[in-house]
Image (cartoon, coloured by chain):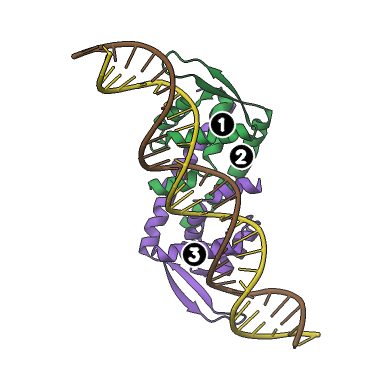
Chain colours: A green, B purple, C brown, D yellow
Amino acid sequence: MANQMTEMLKGTLEGIVLQVLATRPAYGYEITARLREQGFSDLVEGTVYALLIRIEQRGFVDVQKVPSEKGPPRKVYSLNTKGREQLGEFWRAWSFLSEKIGKLQIEQSEGEN
Amino acid sequence: MANQMTEMLKGTLEGIVLQVLATRPAYGYEITARLREQGFSDLVEGTVYALLIRIEQRGFVDVQKVPSEKGPPRKVYSLNTKGREQLGEFWRAWSFLSEKIGKLQIEQSEGEN
DNA sequence: CCGACTACTCTGTGTTGCCAACTACCAGTA
DNA sequence: TACTGGTAGTTGGCAACACAGAGTAGTCGG
C-alpha cells in the first residue's frame, strides 16, 4: 500500500503541489505539513523540498525569502504564468487518465470488453 | 503532455494491466495494441513486456506459452489469487488518490482552503 | 530471398519519490 | 551555560519505473 502510493505519486505530486500553490503562495514546510494532515501521512519532507527546487528551476514558480518568527527564513513559492500553464497540462493529463481508469473500473463490475 | 503522462503512468500502468488481465487472460503484444487503441497511443511495447515480466516475478500472474498462427509463441498471462489481491490494493490506493485530487480540483474553482 | 507483420527480449537512460543525515535558527528550561 | 525541541531547508545515495532503441524469432506473400 505504501509502496503502491509511492509509485502513484510520481507525476501527480507535482500537480498536487502546483494546485496548492495556485490557491495561495506557500513554503515547503507548510506544504508538507498540510498534505500530511490531509492524508498523505507518509509524505517525506525531503521529497517536497526537492520538488519545489525542481519546479523553480523549470520556471513554474517565483520565490521570495521571508523571515520566520521561529527558525530560519522561509522560501515562499508562488505560481506564475508558466506554472499555471503547466498546471493546466497536469489537469488535462489527469482527466484523461482518470477517465480511462474509471472506465476500466466499470467494465470490471459489468464484465465485458 | 507526453512527458506528463509518462510520469503519471508510473504506478498506475501496473494496475491498468492487472485490471485488463482480470477481465480475461492476454499476452503482451495484444495488451499493448489494445491500450494503444484506447488512447494510450504513445505506450511503448518494451514497457508493457517489462511490466509483465515484473508482475510474473512477483507472482501476480500465471503464464502459459501458446503457439501463434503468425509469429513466435505467445506468453499468455492470467491473473491469480495473489494478483487479485494486488489489484484490490491498487484500487484502494487509486481511490484514495483520485478522491484527494478531485477535492483539490473543486477547491480550485471555489477558491477556499 | 526479402520485406512486413507478429511476438518477445534486453541494455541503457532520465525522472522521480524515499531515506537519512546534516545545517541553521530560535525559544524554553534546567 | 548547556540541552532539548520545534521550525525550515539542503544534500547524496538508492530503487522503481517508463521510454528509447536495437535485437532475436517465427510466419507469410511477393
Q: Position of residue A86 (x, y in %)?
A: 64, 36
- Disc 2 residue type (three-letter): Phe
Q: Tell me which residue sits at (49%, 43%) in the image.
A: A9
- Which is more toward the observer, C10 or B20? C10
Foreground: A63 or B47? A63
What's the amino acid at mark 1? Gln
Residue at the spot of label 2: A90
What's the amino acid at mark 3?
A: Leu
Q: Residue A69 shows which numbered tag?
A: none
Q: Can residue B105 be seen by looking at this rendering?
A: no
Eyeballing the image, is C5 above or below A33?
Answer: below
Same chain? Circles 3 and 1: no
Q: Name the residue under label 3.
A: B52
- Locate residue D6 relative to residue B106 in the image: left or right: left
Q: Do the residues labelled 1 and 2 touch (CB within 8 Å)?
A: yes
Residue at the spot 39% in from the left edge and 38% down from the top edge: A42
Dot 2, how many residues are within 10 Å of its Cα: few (below 14), some (14-19), or many (20+)? many
Residue A73 vertical placement versus B73 (above, below):
above
Q: Is mark 2 on a helix, strand or loop?
A: helix
Question: In this rendering, would B56 be left or right of C30?
Answer: right
Return the chain for callout 3: B
Q: Name the residue under label 1.
A: A19
Q: How many labels does the image show?
A: 3
**Few, some or many C-alpha atoms within 10 Å of disc 1 (few <14, some 14-19, many ≥20)?**
many
- In which chain is the residue bearing label 2? A
Give coordinates of residue B60: x percent, y percent. Answer: 40, 63
The residue shown at (62%, 34%) is A57
Q: Where is residue A32 in the image (x, y as percent from the top left)?
A: 45, 30
Q: Mark 3–mark 1 contact, CB under 8 Å?
A: no
Dot 1 falls on which chain? A
